[in-house]
Image (tube, helix red, strand yellow):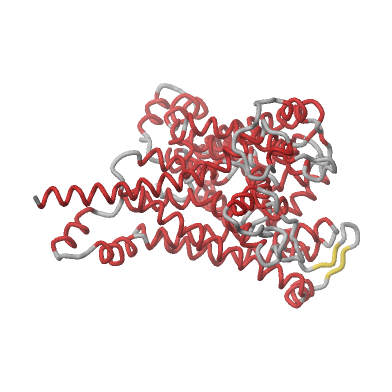
Amino acid sequence: MTSFNKTLQQAWKGRNGYLFILPPLLSLVIFFFYPFLRAIYLSFTDYDGTNMKWVGLDNYIHLLQEENFQKAAVNTLAFTVESLVVGVGIALISALVIHHISTGKGFFRGVFFLPVVTNMVAVSMLWKMLYLKRGLINGVLGMLGIAPISFLGSPQNAMFAIVITSAWQGFGYSMVMFLAALEGIPKEFYEAADIDGANFFQKFWFITIPELRYTFLFLSITGVSGAVMVFTQIYVMTAGGPLKSTGTVMFDLFDRFIHLRLGEANAIGVIIFLFLLVFSLINLRISRERDS
Amino acid sequence: MKNQQYRLRKAIIQSFLYTFLVVGGFLTLFPFIWMFLSTFKTEAEIFSVPPTLLPSSFQFDNYVYIWNSLGNFPRFLFNSVFVTASVVILNLFFDSLAAFAFAKLKFPGRDNLFSLFLATMLVPGQVLLIELYRIIQNLGWINSYQALILPSAMSAFGIFLIWQYMKNIPDDFLEAARMDGANDFDIYLRIYMPLSAPAMAVLAIFTFIGTWNDFLWPLIVTNSEELRTLVVGLALMQGNNVMHWTWLMTGAFISVAPVILFYILAQRYFIAGLTAGGVKG
């Protein structure tokens, strides 16, 4: 009883603390916990906005067996892997080059980072125009005597065309991360390797790459979280077509939401959340390990 | 002699590196340059064969047209500015105030509440999209500024960002100011908030970019031209039957130009702001 009284007294003394965190706390309850719990609950129901029926795991079972969703999941996975490989690859090469030049590091860093600050709708529209049959890329290819290529119009090419646009927009972020990590590698490592007579590639393979391991991990995890959510590029450039070749899970969720299949749409949300939770927890573990 | 050889080798390597960067920089910037030049061209000109770089004459017809006749373009621009400014200001105030409480004030349950905030960062916002929409609908806020502003007026990430910075500011100020009879809010407003200016700048830029460029949320909670932001208005212009690429490029250019301008002026803060989630403090 006395300890309860003591806690109350401390709470009264610290009342300003509660007051100062009250607005974000309310915001959290209304705009986070309530919709979050509701989304989980509704994922077990058949719901069109008016009539609700508990269906247990049916939505999940149905989704996992449904061709539409499977296709969207495969497309999302393809986009995720491709954009990660292309984006991180370009970022690593440009970071290494910038790291080794004598002057102008800040300038080139600034140039490569620029697309990161621009909005995806404008970027997607711009690239959609560049990709047209009569667009600039085919125009330049035409000057070289190459027949026009259908980028966004062909089910084979469309997703990779979107990957290129996304990598172009986002690689500057990974590049900045790599640059920061490169600066952090102690010079002594390379000096010691020089004394041992290591060549450039040996130093790269045995010092640089292992020293960048946390950056690789961090970028893979954040990259996956971002890529799984891909929506805007798809919405603007292909609307999921042609022949559903670029439909992703987020696009599928949006589609079902619009058609008021809210139980299924929320189930997709929960599936995305659980998938990403695994990655986030790994990320947390790694950053803890790195700190200690 | 050996020294000279070494220097020659170094110069050759450096010139390779710079060539790579100039080509890479060109590929990075050229699409924007093409976008900018397209805003002065006619529809026939942007698809001319072979492609031409410069417009035959710098005419402003596209700007005049989209400003006056296409949807409600001035309103889109106003909405983007108003919504972005509101979200940035609200975040700066509420996030830093809560961060101050978590970093400097003592009250029972503080650390658990803080962990609760941090845990929410594990849930991506898109997962909440539908049910958040339905709350807004139940509140009768569809097509309103509240819907565009309030759900993002505070953020756990923003609180965390400022908290990280504030916890390293000594507690001495707090004790000294209390002795002088200052209340907690004064101490926040006059001491800890101003001292956190670098972190506040990072949060301001992070929020500015996120809100200005946001697409999915403003797309679903607005359904009239009066409430559309620039980015959403632009995306929906595409669906118009008589759409010209020159108009779309002009709209797209207007949506990225202010951001690029700020970026050029405060590049360091932008890079710090957008990578804040990744660099451990």
Q: Position of residue A28 (x, y in %)?
A: 65, 47
The quadrant of the rendering that contains the C terminus of chain A is bottom left
Residue at (72% x, 50% y) in the render = A236
Q: Looking at this view, is B53 or B216 the one in front?
A: B53
Whether residue B240 is situated above or below residue B127 in the rendered picture: above
Residue B93 in which image quadrant: top right
Residue at the outermost left position: B1
Of the pair A275 and A179, the residue shown nearer to us: A179
Residue A9 in view (yes/no): no
Instruction: Estimate the x, y position of residue A23 in percent, counting from the top left.
Output: 63, 38
**Which residue sits furthest right?**
A51
Which residue is rendered at x = 82% and y = 46% of the image? B137
Extreme residue in the top direction: B180
From this viewpoint, is residue A143 visible? yes
* Rendered location of residue A260, percent (x, y): 85, 59
Against A188, residue B37 (above or below) is above
Residue located at (81% from left, 33% from top): B71
| Residue that appears at 19% across and 62% down | A193
Q: Does A128 sit left or right of B159 as displayed?
A: right
Instruction: Name the quadrant containing residue B84.
Output: top right
Q: How many marks?
A: 0
Give coordinates of residue A178: x percent, y percent: 39, 53
Nearest to the observer: residue B159 or residue A90: A90
